[in-house]
């Protein structure tokens, strides 16, 4: 594997992990009993962005090969689980998935 492909793969994994973290944040907040009524009118926005990032990451990784797409999903879920559930870090960092997706597009050009 070339180093360019490895960088693109790492960007796809980071994008997928950020999307999965955004998607699971709503469920984690409900499980912990956190108050989310302040953002009730846009409570589905993190889930929508998360699904879009996950789809984009799988689509981008599949251009490297289907094995990379499967590895992106598995490693992305592992990183997201570690970040959200084990370390319990702030979810705002998952918004970096959008610049990661943009950088991966520039890598394919």
Image (cartoon, rainbow, N blue to C red):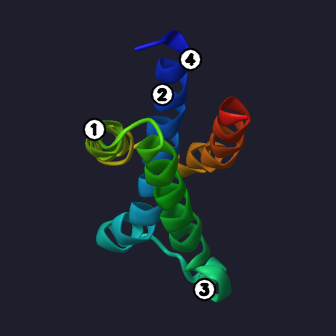
Q: Nearer the viewer, mark 4 or mark 2?
A: 4
Q: What's the CA distance linking mark 3 and mark 1? A: 39 Å
For label 4, the SS is helix
Label 3 environment density (alpha carbons within 10 Å; few <14, some 14–19, many ≥20): few
Q: Which mark is residue 32?
A: none
Whole-percent x, y for residue 19 in the image: 49, 55
Q: Nearer the viewer, mark 2 or mark 1?
A: 1
> From the image, which quarter does the N terminus lie in?
top left
Q: Which residue is mark 3?
A: 40
Residue sitting at x 68%, y 41%: 105
Q: Based on the displayed image, in which of its 4 quarters is residue 4 positioned?
A: top right
Sequence-wise, the earlier of marks 3 and 4 is: 4
Q: Nearer the viewer, residue 64 or 42?
A: 64
Residues under numbered marks 2 and 1 in contact, where contact means CB atoms less than 8 Å apart: no
Q: What's the CA distance linking mark 4 and mark 1? A: 17 Å
Count of numbered marks: 4
Q: What's the CA distance linking mark 4 and mark 2? A: 10 Å
Q: Which mark is residue 67?
A: 1
For label 2, the SS is helix
For label 1, the SS is helix
Residue 14 appears left or right of 87: right
Residue sitting at x 41%, y 55%: 20
Q: What's the CA distance linking mark 2 and mark 1? A: 14 Å
Q: Which residue is mark 4?
A: 4
Q: What's the CA distance linking mark 3 and mark 4? A: 42 Å
Whole-percent x, y for residue 85 in the image: 30, 48
Q: Which residue is mark 2?
A: 10
Q: In the rendered image of this protein, does residue 15 appear above or below residue 47? A: above
């Amino acid at each position: 594997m070339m180093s360019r492909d490895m960088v693109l793969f790492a960007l796809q994994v980071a994008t997928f992990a950020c999307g999965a973290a955004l998607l699971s944040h709503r469920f984690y907040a409900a499980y912990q009993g956190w108050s989310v009524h302040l953002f009730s009118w846009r409570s589905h926005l993190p889930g929508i962005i998360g699904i879009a990032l996950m789809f984009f990451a799988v689509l981008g990784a599949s251009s490297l090969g289907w094995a990379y797409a499967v590895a992106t999903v598995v490693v992305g879920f592992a990183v997201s689980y570690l970040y959200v559930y084990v370390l319990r870090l702030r979810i705002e960092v998952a918004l970096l998935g959008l610049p990661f997706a943009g950088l991966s597009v520039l890598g394919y050009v």
